[in-house]
Image (cartoon, helix red, strand yellow):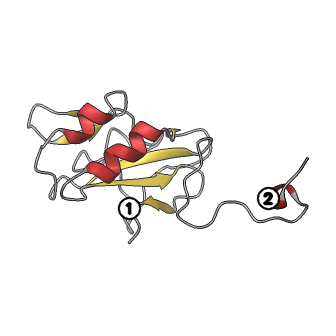
Amino acid sequence: MSGPADAPGAAGPAAGQRTAAERVVVRVDRDRCIGSGMCALTAPGSLELGADGLARPLRVAATDGGGGEDGDGGGGEDGAPAGAGPGSGEPLTERLAEAVDYCPVEALALYSAGDGRRIAPAR
């Protein structure tokens, strides 16, 4: 039995809605990060605290060259990750989404690896 979402021509997820199959790139605003560690505790496979005590993603966009000038895992002019594209990034998991939500200073952002759009947090 199929529902309205299965109907031909049905729209995909709404803007900002997270889907488990989506690949994402995590960006850390290191000027904003206070090193609380909530992100690294919540999503240890995706984020860690560096030697400087600030969060950093464990994976960066494929052509980002190691995290950009400030080591934030991003680099696009609008804050979108440089080099994001199909096959880059990592799968969006509930733990990763929670890590972004739990950041007390909103220093984390998720971007679609496919098209670079910001997924979370909403602006």
Q: Position of residue 67 (x, y in %)?
A: 31, 43
Q: Nearer the viewer, residue 75 or 21?
A: 21
Tell me the residue at 91%/47% (across/down).
1
Q: Is residue 3 above or below residue 43?
A: below
Residue located farthest toward the front when viewing the structure as drawn: 1
Amino acid type at circle 1 is: Pro
Residue highlighted by disc 2:
5
Check contact, mark 1 vs mark 2: CB within 8 A: no
**Nearer mark to the viewer, of 1 and 2:** 2
Q: Report the disc number at residue 33.
A: none
Mark 2 crowdedness (10 Å alpha carbons): few <14, some 14-19, many ≥20: few
Residue 117 placement, left or right of 41 = right
Q: Is residue 59 above or below residue 10?
A: above
Tell me the residue at 84%/56% (across/down).
3
Secondary element at tag 1: loop
Q: Position of residue 9 (x, y in %)?
A: 87, 65
Q: Quadrant of residue 52?
A: top left
Q: Is residue 7 above or below residue 60?
A: below
Quadrant where the C terminus is found in the figure: bottom left
Q: Nearer the viewer, residue 118 or 41?
A: 41
Q: Position of residue 41 (x, y in %)?
A: 24, 32
Q: Nearer the viewer, residue 59 or 22?
A: 22
Residue highlighted by disc 1:
121
Tell me the residue at 26%/40% (across/down).
39
**Label tally:** 2
Amino acid type at circle 2 is: Ala
Residue 55 placement, left or right of 51 = right
Tell me which numbered mark, 1 or 2, is placed earlier along the sequence.
2
Distance between the alpha carbons at the discs numbered 1 and 2? 25 Å
